[in-house]
Amino acid sequence: MSGCEHKISGSREKIWLPYYFEGRDRGLKPHPYCTECGLIKNLSSERPRSIGYFMNIIAELGCRHKVAKIQTRLIALEMERQALDDKFGMDRKQQEDLFVEITTRILNIPARAVFELLT
């Protein structure tokens, strides 16, 4: 993903897109976007989580499964590379799906084991 600092478009320059609240369609709403990379800002009711939250999940996985320090480091680097902490364009569901994909690939554990800790 990009390392953009996300400069938000002005209040007059917004894109009208569908708006969802608590999983239900609520019509159209103006969405701001980044003038540098063009990414549209997420206005979902599910706010994204910080990287620290996901690192705590990895620590809990370390108690349940054998996790080497290098595996923890690889997961952290991959989360950084995939811009998992980009709160501008990613909602919580997208973050969780990406985290599960990264974690199961590196640790070779079932996705169910990771999903149990996310809820």
Image (tube, rainbow, N blue to C red):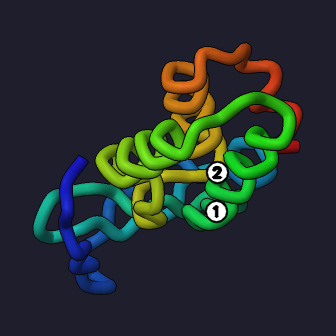
Q: Of tags 2 and 1, which is closer to the observer?
A: 1
Mark 2 — residue?
Answer: 92
Secondary structure at badge 2 equals helix
Q: Residue at x 88, y 33 (%)?
A: 116
Q: Residues within 10 Å of mark 1 (few under 14, many from 20)?
A: some
Circle 2: residue type: Arg
Q: Which residue is mark 1?
A: 49
Residue at point 15% right, 70% down?
35
Residue 103 image label: none
Q: State which quarter of the image contains the C terminus.
A: top right
Q: Nearer the viewer, residue 108 or 91?
A: 108
Q: Residue at x 73, y 14 (%)?
A: 110
Splitting the image into 4 quarters, where does residue 65 fall? top right
Q: Is residue 63 shown above or below 37?
A: above
Tag 2 near tag 1, CB within 8 Å: yes
Amino acid, disc 1? Arg
Counting from the top left corner in percent of width and height, residue 69 is at 54, 46
- Does residue 94 appear to the left or right of 3 in the view shown? right
Q: Position of residue 48 (x, y in %)?
A: 61, 60
